[in-house]
């Protein structure tokens, strides 16, 4: 197979050249100057594939699947948000979970995996909620999906407790279901996730963190917390500091760095409260994380965060003033030296009703959300949805931006096509009119103006 007219940028001097790349059995066999005929074809780009470091599998498309039109599947149409509040999202999603069936979970899950693959995603951490309502059904369905889609993408299953595991009447049963999942389905589970902030007291939140760390170490899985999901100004009292501190302390106490497999990472999602730190506190936390030498990765979920956080309070008279608080991922990487990346979190449910789940669209919105508009920023944002995201969930980062070289394995790379012209109905007796299309030649073109899904393909 020959990939014609590939634009190859040389990171060393910023120049770009075009080549025809001959591939044999997935590997580059020959790189030649493009032929005259190939120069007439639209240019193409080869890029590292996309990764979802944090996406909820069982909750996808609850509000947009309309699967209820088929009487075989549950109807969720009465669960559309009325207020759009976080409390309502939790309540409505609990009701939705009570209606889950295996066929419905499989259908919505396969729609998410197929859509992600078409968008250029080849790996993901898929969160499946396990509690006294769902039982193990989301997990057993996710295992079927993982196997059925294994030839297209790597689905790393995260056994996830969205609900309290130490508070309320259901804390104990919720915890035992996760325990059972970790024991019975060990070969299929890649990560353990919990939500310490949903517990009823700080003491219970700390128990949640301790328990999750102990279990992750015992079962040799990655660890993932939904953490500090608030925009309250953080207290400086040691007993009231953001739970991110408690996670670091607890990991150190449990000797994570010495005991855990070197490949196992700790991902911290949301952490919106960290955006309320002043610069001195941000720096102090970053220094603590870096000095700990723990493999901690912050996963920014900005589209979910800006939808959920900063709602006006009933006593606040400035209801149009809404702080769009989310971790500032580019600054955390560039200024604080932390590991961080970006995730979509939810698609088509009460936590994030909008969006297609496309990581490239997320990177594009991130330009505005983070107010980062340089070419280098666009390149960093692409990293945040590809190689940095893979690292955060503990996957090898094989794909590089290196100029294409002979022998290089291109399987799993993302190929982006350009179009030469778009056609429209003609006038003045002509059957059609054509408009030459802009050519995307670099990462900034792709992040600022993501290509349609039909122009993307994963090389196999
Ligand atoms: Zn989440």
Image: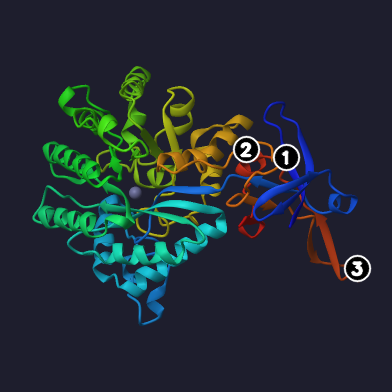
Q: Residue at image x 84%, y 43%?
A: 33
Residue toward you, 419 or 96: 419
Q: Residue at image x 18%, y 22%?
A: 237
- Res 64 seen here: no
94 horizontally vs 454: left or right: left
Residue on which disc 1 sits: 8
355 horizontally vs 299: left or right: right
Element type where label 3 sits in the image:
loop
Q: Position of residue 252 (x, y in %)?
A: 23, 28
Q: CA distance from mark 3 to mark 2?
A: 48 Å
Element type where label 1 sits in the image:
strand
Element type where label 2 sits in the image:
loop
- Label of residue 428 in the image: 3
Label 1 neighbour load within 10 Å: few <14, some 14-19, many 20+: many
Q: Are marks 2 and 1 in contact (CB under 8 Å)?
A: no
- Label of residue 401 in the image: 2
Mark earlier in primary sequence (3, 1): 1
Residue toward you, 296 or 304: 296
């Amino acid at each position: 197979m020959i990939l014609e007219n590939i634009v190859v940028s040389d990171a060393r001097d910023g120049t770009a050249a075009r080549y025809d790349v001959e591939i044999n059995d997935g590997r580059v066999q020959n790189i030649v100057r493009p032929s005259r005929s190939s120069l007439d074809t639209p240019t193409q780009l080869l890029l590292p594939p996309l990764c979802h470091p944090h996406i909820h599998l069982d909750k996808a498309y609850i509000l947009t699947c309309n699967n209820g039109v088929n009487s075989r599947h549950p109807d969720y149409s009465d669960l559309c948000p009325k207020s759009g509040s976080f409390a309502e999202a939790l309540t409505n999603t609990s009701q939705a979970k009570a209606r889950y069936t295996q066929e419905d979970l499989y259908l919505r899950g396969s729609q998410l995996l197929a859509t992600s693959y078409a968008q250029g995603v080849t790996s993901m951490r898929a969160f499946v909620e396990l509690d006294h309502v769902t039982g193990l059904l989301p997990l057993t369905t996710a295992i079927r999906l993982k196997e059925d889609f294994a030839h297209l993408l790597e689905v790393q299953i995260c056994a996830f407790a969205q609900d309290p595991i130490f508070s309320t009447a259901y804390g104990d049963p919720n915890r035992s279901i996760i325990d059972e999942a970790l024991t019975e389905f060990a070969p299929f589970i890649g990560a353990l996730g919990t939500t310490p902030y949903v517990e009823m007291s700080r003491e219970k939140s700390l128990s949640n963190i301790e328990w999750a760390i102990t279990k992750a170490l015992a079962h040799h899985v990655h660890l993932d917390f939904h953490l500090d999901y608030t925009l309250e100004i953080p207290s400086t009292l040691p007993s009231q500091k953001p739970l991110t501190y408690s996670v670091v302390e607890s990991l150190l106490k449990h000797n994570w760095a010495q005991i855990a497999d070197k490949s196992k990472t700790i991902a911290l999602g949301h952490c919106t409260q960290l955006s309320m730190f002043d610069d001195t506190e941000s720096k102090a936390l970053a220094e603590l994380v870096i000095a700990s030498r723990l493999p901690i990765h912050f996963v920014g979920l900005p589209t979910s965060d800006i939808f959920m956080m900063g709602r006006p309070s009933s006593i606040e008279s400035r209801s149009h003033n809404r702080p769009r608080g989310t971790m500032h991922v580019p600054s955390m990487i560039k200024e604080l030296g932390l590991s961080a990346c970006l995730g979509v979190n939810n698609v088509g449910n009460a936590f994030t009703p909008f969006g297609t789940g496309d990581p490239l669209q997320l990177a594009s919105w991130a330009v505005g959300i983070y107010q980062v508009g340089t070419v280098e920023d666009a390149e960093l944002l692409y990293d945040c949805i590809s190689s940095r995201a893979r690292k955060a969930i503990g996957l090898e980062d094989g794909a590089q931006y290196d100029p294409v070289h002979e022998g290089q394995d291109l399987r799993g790379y993302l190929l982006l096509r350009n179009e030469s012209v778009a056609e429209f109905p003609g006038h003045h007796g002509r059957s059609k009119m054509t408009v030459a299309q802009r050519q995307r030649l670099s990462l900034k073109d792709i992040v600022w103006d993501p290509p349609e899904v039909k122009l993307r393909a994963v090389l196999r």
